Image (spheres, rainbow, N blue to C red):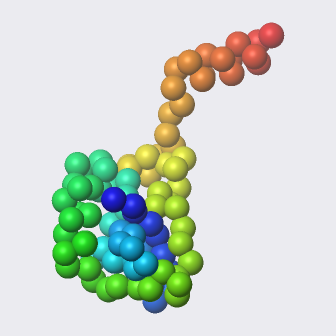
Amino acid sequence: MRWVRAIVDTEPRLGVLAGDRVQVLAGSTSLIELLAAGQLAEAGQHTLAHPETVLDLDDVHLFAPIENPLRSATGGPVRQPLAVRATRQYNQDS
């Protein structure tokens, strides 16, 4: 399943790419929220079966499905893995 974001009525909306169409998810949920809730597959199947709207691929500008990858589902910054933090600290101390 290929998730995308597209502008619908001046708002970025999440959708599923289905051939040459984007089937738009009902509501304003983000991909991060769906992942955090464990509902990604269910939401995708529902969107394919019952899209809020369907857009022709030629008529939309697509965006990455994750709006801001540097933010967590709670809105706070994502912490870097320990190895990355340790390497940066080592480089700063050297």
- Horizontal side of 49 relative to 54 (left or right) equals left
Q: Residue at x 21, y 65 (%)?
A: 45
Find residue 93 and report its image quarter.
top right
User: Could one spot residue 14 in this view of the protein?
Assistant: no
Figure disc tally: 0
Q: Vertical placement of 74 versus 57: above or below? A: above
The extreme top residue here reads 94
* Image coords of residue 64 (percent x, y): 52, 61
Q: Vertical placement of 14 versus 53: above or below? A: above
* Image coords of residue 34 (percent x, y): 29, 56
Quadrant occupied by the N terminus: bottom left
* Image coords of residue 69 (percent x, y): 52, 50
* Image coords of residue 11 (percent x, y): 47, 80
- Horizontal side of 6 relative to 52 (left or right) equals right
Q: Residue at x 41, y 85 (%)?
A: 55
User: Could one spot residue 25 in this view of the protein?
Assistant: yes
Q: Residue at x 44, y 86 (%)?
A: 56
Q: Vertical placement of 32 versus 8: above or below? A: above
Q: Which residue occupies the foreground of this view, 50 or 7?
A: 50
- Horizontal side of 28 relative to 88 (left or right) equals left
The extreme right residue here reads 94
- Horizontal side of 51 relative to 30 (left or right) equals left
Q: Vertical placement of 30 versus 62: above or below? A: above
The extreme front residue here reads 19
Quadrant occupied by the C terminus: top right
Q: Residue at x 70, y 13 (%)?
A: 90
